[in-house]
Image: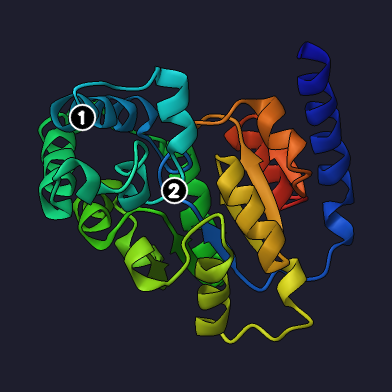
Amino acid sequence: MADEVKMGVEAESDRIAKASELDSVPCLLWDVDGTLVDTTELISASLGHVYQKYYGRTLPDAERRALIGTPLSKQVRVFGPLEDFGIAEADILGDFIAYYEVHRERERILHDVIAILIEGKRRGLPTGLVTSKNREELANTLPRLGIADYVDFAVTADDIPHPKPAPDGILLALDYFAIPADRRPNAFYIGDTVHDMHAASAAGVRGVGVTWGAALPESLAATNPYAVCTTPEALHALLFPGS
């Protein structure tokens, strides 16, 4: 395992060295949970709460973490269709969000990463969010991040027929920014889960995995992303080489 992580770090350095040769970047697209704000423990705890309440059982923390990056509507169906258990979707989703918000002080805003998003926008790059949060979840969290003035467009799980790991959200953002087909491969999508990296690959953009979220570094590296960044400083160097 250590060797796999080391390989990922070495690949990261190689990618950064090549970044100065890249064509101009048409836009920066960002995941939210685990990328801009550390919510991994809180999401896992919130899932554990609703699983125990509605199903009388739960999953190990590692299995709950693996669900992060997919929509809540999918996460709550991990044991099967809700109707098989007599569960109303509005009830279980509402209880998840209520538990999360009661414990929202456990969110940890990643200010160094937020600063990179803001810098990208100030450099003139169209900036978007592509998240598996639903609209209500994003509306709750976004004001706490302080980035509303720096985000041009946001895609939630409610806005597309097929959320991550499908590419629909990224493609919708590229369409919104009117990025031509020949420049789309130069766009970046930054996220912390394998679902993010699969979505980026399917959309034909540069997926950048960050290791401070839900997925293990070797899991991100196994998806063959454009780069894996282990620190915000490495991410900054990748996105803004020479600065």
Amino acid at dot 1: Tyr
**In the visual, does 229 lie left or right of 15?**
left
Look at mark 2 in the image and give the residue it sits on. 70
**In the visual, does 232 lie left or right of 60?**
right
The x, y position of residue 48, in whole percent, is 26, 25
Which residue is at a point 54% across and 62% down the rendered structure image?
29
The x, y position of residue 8, in whole percent, is 79, 30
Which residue is at a point 66% across and 67% down the rendered structure image?
203
Which residue is at a point 34% across and 56% down the rendered structure image?
147
**Image disc number at residue 95:** none
Q: Quadrant of residue 236?
A: top right
Q: Residues within 10 Å of mark 1 (few under 14, many from 20)?
A: some
Which residue is at the far front?
84
Q: Quadrant of residue 92?
A: top left
Of the pair 157 and 59, the residue shown nearer to us: 59
Which residue is at a point 72% across and 47% down the rendered structure image?
238
**Mark-to-mark CA distance, 2 and 1:** 20 Å
Of the pair 114 and 195, the residue shown nearer to us: 195
Q: Quadrant of residue 17?
A: top right
Q: Residues within 10 Å of mark 2 (few under 14, many from 20)?
A: many
Relative height, residue 241 to residue 111 (above, below): below
Look at mark 1 in the image and give the residue it sits on. 55
Of the residues under marks 2 and 1, which one precedes in the sequence?
1
Of discs 2 and 1, which sits in the foreground? 1
The x, y position of residue 144, in whole percent, is 23, 46
Relative height, residue 238 to residue 222 (above, below): below
